[in-house]
Image (cartoon, rainbow, N blue to C red):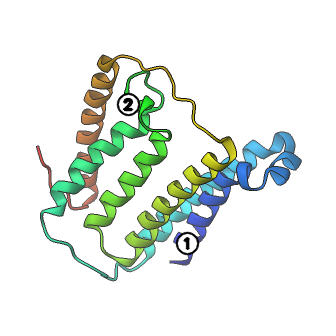
Amino acid sequence: MTLLVLGLGLWMCGHLMKRLLPGLRAALGRTGKPVVAVMIVAGLVLMIVGYRATEAAPIYVLPFWVWYLNNALMLVALVLLDAGRVKGVIRTKIRHPMLTGVTVWSAAHLLVNGDMPSVVLFGGLGIWALAEMAVINRSEGAWARPEPGSLARDARLVLIASVLYAVIVAIHGWLGYGVFVVF
């Protein structure tokens, strides 16, 4: 569990450093970007190693039907993760689509993973995404909505997310993680 928590800490510090510690980030100068990148990658590696090494002590078990909700939320999360980049309509409705996608992803995983390492990992990443949104909102002020694009671009995004979803389901199955496919 220690590696998992340390990984989450490095991930959060790397992502939040620019806004919470701007003086430190500025003092690092040109070496700041590689330092932050190493923090984030090391955090990711430690989260994976720590998650896999921690005994899965169950905390809660939700009803079977939440698997359907999980799968629907995962498709929504995948769409949101890239919606900010796609010049469609979705990006005009949500200020932080990628971070909202991480929050939805986190919640979906918490529905079907009620063991201690999962609660720490997925709950921690969900808390980080919410904190990141709050820090960005505070530092940047009011949101200037982008001009809407076409619904066709959003439809294409949903199609690509659906294909990616199928690939992720296949990988989860190959790795031995339980997946219950809606479609």
Give percent across and percent down for residue 31: 82, 44
Residue sitting at x 43%, y 25%: 86
Give percent across and percent down for residue 164: 30, 37
Q: Amino acid at mark 1?
A: Val
32 lies above or below 155: below
Give percent across and percent down for residue 131: 56, 58
Residue sitting at x 35%, y 60%: 107
Give the residue number, with chain letter if any, for mark 2.
90
Residue sitting at x 38%, y 69%: 118
What number is the disc on residue 33?
none
In depth, the one of 59 and 40 nearer the eye is 59
- Give the left or right position of residue 25, taking residue 131 as reference: right
Give percent across and percent down for residue 133: 55, 50
In depth, the one of 49 and 18 nearer the eye is 18
Give the residue number, with chain letter if any, for mark 1.
5
Residue 39 seen from this side:
yes
Assess disc 2: are there few (<14), some (14-19) or many (≥20) residues with their C-alpha within 10 Å of its C-alpha.
many
59 lies above or below 66: below
Describe the element under mark 1 as helix, strand or loop. helix
- Give the left or right position of residue 5, taking residue 162 as reference: right
In the image, farthest residue toward the right? 27
- Give the left or right position of residue 96, taking residue 38 as reference: left
